[in-house]
Image (cartoon, helix red, strand yellow):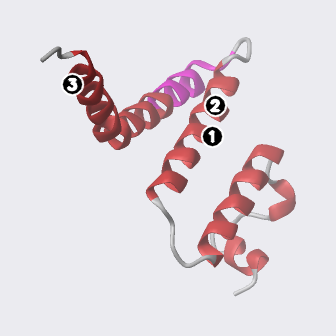
Amino acid sequence: MELDEFLSKFGIKFETLEAEERKTLMGWLENLSRKQISLEDVKNYIRQMVDSVAKELCEYELPKKKDIFLKARLRNYLLLLDFLTAPEKAKKSLENYLKNIKL
């Protein structure tokens, strides 16, 4: 399936996407072509989305509805990232704790 054909199913044209959206889409297409998406790929994508939403929130005079929507998106991305990184953080904390134990 061609990219334009795929996007048209959602009423989207590649040309109308913003630069950040194009970059994200191309990154996901690259990952999909590998047939396997890693957990690290998902974490990196979420980090990119957090940065993107944070930049949008820095705009002055956002409409109230958009401001609320962006804050909700940001909170969801941050919660998801915390969920995905919790095992790593727990492991590092345990390792640090065990390093500090004097026998």
What secondary structure is found at the residue carrying circle 2?
Answer: helix
Residue 88 is drawn in which quadrant? Answer: top left
**Residue 74 placement, left or right of 34:** left
Q: CA distance from mark 2 to mark 1?
A: 5 Å
Q: To which residue does mark 2 refer?
A: 51
- Tell me which numbered mark, 3 or 1, is placed earlier along the sequence: 1
What secondary structure is found at the residue carrying circle 3?
Answer: helix
Amino acid at circle 1: Gln
Comparing marks 3 and 2, which lies closer to the viewer?
A: 3
Q: CA distance from mark 3 to mark 2?
A: 34 Å
Q: What's drawn in magenta, residue-wise?
A: 62-72
Q: To which residue does mark 1 refer?
A: 48
Q: Is residue 63 magenta?
A: yes
Residue 52 is drawn in which quadrant? Answer: top right
> Which quadrant, please, contains the C terminus?
top left
On screen, residue 24 above or below 98: below
> Which quadrant, please, contains the N terminus?
bottom right
Q: Residue at x 17, y 14 (%)?
A: 102
On screen, residue 73 above or below 16: above
Residues under numbered marks 2 and 1 in contact, where contact means CB atoms less than 8 Å apart:
yes
